[in-house]
Each structure stands twice: as C-alpha cells, then as structure tokens.
Image (cartoon, rainbow, N blue to C red):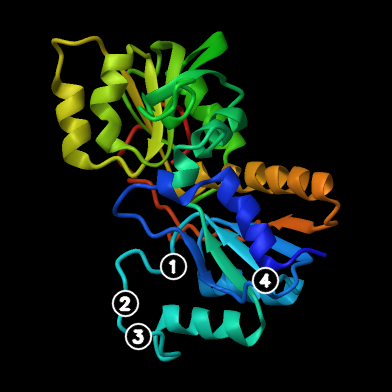
C-alpha cells in the first residue's frame, strides 16, 4: 500500500501545481506524508457533508476540485465551518488534496470531462496554454457535434446528461437556432466570452453567467448570434471527478497499489429548489 507522499506525487504529475492560476490555492491542505493510503474519495467541494462521507467510507485521502481556503485564513478553530472540516479530517486521519485551476488547464481536464458528458467531439482548447507546445492544454474546449442540434435540443441534452440541480439549464439566444460547434468551460465562464466569440462557435455552455455580461453579449447585434447555456457551477465540474478517479485508478494499477477509488455523488450545489415565474412562457417548452 502506498504512502500519502507517493499518491500526492502521482496527483501532482496529473495536475502540476505550477499550472494553477497565480491566485489559486491548490495542493495538499491536510495530511501526514508518511500515512498509508488505501481508499480515496473524489468530490467537487471540501464541505462538511463530503468530509462526513469520507469518514463513513473510511477514506484516507479526499481529493476535491475546489479549495478549502482560497483566500487564506487566520484560524482553523472548530467554531468555524471550515475549521470543523480541518478538525474532522485530522481526527480521522484523512488527508485533503486540491486540484483546481491546474485541473481546469490539464489535458485531459475539467472541460474535457464536461464535453465527454455531453457527447461532444473535442477539437482543442478555447484558450490555449502558451507553455504547452502540443497546444492541447488550456482553459475551456472548442467542440463539435456529430449531428447538428437546435439550442433547445442541446439544452435538453445538457439537462439530461449533467447531474440534476435546482437551476437546470438557462438559455440566452434563439432556441430554434442550429448548433454545430460548441465551446464549453466547467465552472464560472463569463470571463471567456471574448474568446468564445473569437472561436466562431454556435453556442457556449458554462456556469455562473452574470446578468450584465450576458446582456451586453446578447445586445451586440453587429456580430453573429451565439447562444449561451448556463448550468449550475457544481454540475459542470462534477464530471471531472469521474475522469480524475479513472486517471488515479490507472496509476494505481500500473504501480500495483490496489487503491480503492470512489466518486462522491453527494450534491453540494448550494441551491435546493426552483420556482418558475407563473407568467413566464418558457421558450424551451419546459413545464412551469
């Protein structure tokens, strides 16, 4: 059975910390390098419910996409929610490792997993990583459909294939427009709108699209129309957990470690319900 330091070295090969954005907080947060690892749990968020799941599973290592402390802290007191997470992890000898924007930029990474969930054919990164001579790493992915779909049909596919959330899929644009090419980006994607426009795709699927950027984007009628599909942040990143677990499984098999690797299906999207406006006619035909 491997030590934590050996497993972390493998994770760092998959998602090197130096490829994370400068503002990010990735890497190992909690854990003794000498402890043994037999069971690993992947999840999007390092929140109390996920840590409790790791305890029940008797996991030795929790790997999450989102950082625990993104902006730093002055306390890990158990009187705070994040402090309780730290205390629970240490009490049960569970290590925590984070792969965030380094997993976003990886090949394969978060957006590859999102494209795979939607059965899209990947053509390349939306924003290429200038340090990658092969031109495969970077933020987002530009993809093609094997057969054109309407925006309505693409939204329905996303709603069916991605984990169910209260939000579902929001759409900006003509629901009857044909889509042949799609850009995708797991997580918050409205900072990539200029790159999406430059890519010349028919649609962009991401999360956390804000009112003003979308309004300004839609009002720019001098450019070709482009549909925007907005899913829940957690739902666009959860497929990466399955991809990442498969990658670690392959490493474990080659090394003869015999790790038992699990993916959490606990929904940690913070929104719990949705009530449609009673006077709104839904252009996608969904029931109010």
CB under 8 Å between discs 3 and 2: yes
Mark found first going from the N terminus, 1 or 4:
4
Label 3 and label 1: CA atoms lie apart by 13 Å
Where is residue 271? Give x, y as percent: 43, 58
Residue named by callout 2: 73
Q: Nearer the viewer, mark 2 or mark 4?
A: 2
Give whichever of discs 4 and 3 has the lower sequence position: 4
The residue carrying pointer 1 sits among few (fewer than 14), some (14 to 19) or many (20 or more) residues within 10 Å by Cα, namely: many
Q: Residue at x 17, y 31 (%)?
A: 215
Tag 2 and tag 4, C-beta contact below 8 Å: no
* Residue depth check, mark 4 versus mark 3: number of the one nearer the observer: 3
For mark 4, what is the residue? 54
Q: Which residue is mark 3?
A: 75
Rounded to the nearest whole Å, what is the CA distance between mark 2 and mark 1?
10 Å
Q: Position of residue 88 (x, y in %)?
A: 58, 83
Residue tagged 1? 68
């Amino acid at each position: 059975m491997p030590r934590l330091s050996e497993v972390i070295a493998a994770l760092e090969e998959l998602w090197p910390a130096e490829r994370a954005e400068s503002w990010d907080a990735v890497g190992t947060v909690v854990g003794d390098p000498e402890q043994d690892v037999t069971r690993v749990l992947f999840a999007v968020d390092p929140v109390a419910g996920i840590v409790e799941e790791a305890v029940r599973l008797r996991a030795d290592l929790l790997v999450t996409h989102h950082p625990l402390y993104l902006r730093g802290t002055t306390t890990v007191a158990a009187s705070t929610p994040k402090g309780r997470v730290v205390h629970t992890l240490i009490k049960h000898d569970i290590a925590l490792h984070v792969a965030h924007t380094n997993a976003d930029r990886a090949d394969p990474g978060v957006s590859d997993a999102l494209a795979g969930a939607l059965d899209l054919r990947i053509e390349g990164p939306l924003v290429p990583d200038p340090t990658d001579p092969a031109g495969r790493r970077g933020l987002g992915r530009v993809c093609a459909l094997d057969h054109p779909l309407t925006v309505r049909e693409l939204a329905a596919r996303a709603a069916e294939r991605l984990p169910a959330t209260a939000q579902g899929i929001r759409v900006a644009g003509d629901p009857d427009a044909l889509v042949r090419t799609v850009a995708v980006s797991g997580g918050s994607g409205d900072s990539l709108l200029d790159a999406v426009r430059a890519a010349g795709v028919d649609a962009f699927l991401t999360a956390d699209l804000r009112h003003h950027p979308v309004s300004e984007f839609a009002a720019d009628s001098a450019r070709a129309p482009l549909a925007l599909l907005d899913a829940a942040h957690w739902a666009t990143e959860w497929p990466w957990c399955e991809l990442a677990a498969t990658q670690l499984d392959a490493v474990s098999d080659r090394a003869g470690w015999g790790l038992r690797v699990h993916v959490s299906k606990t929904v940690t999207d913070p929104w719990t319900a949705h009530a449609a406006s009673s006077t709104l006619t839904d252009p996608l035909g969904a029931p109010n």
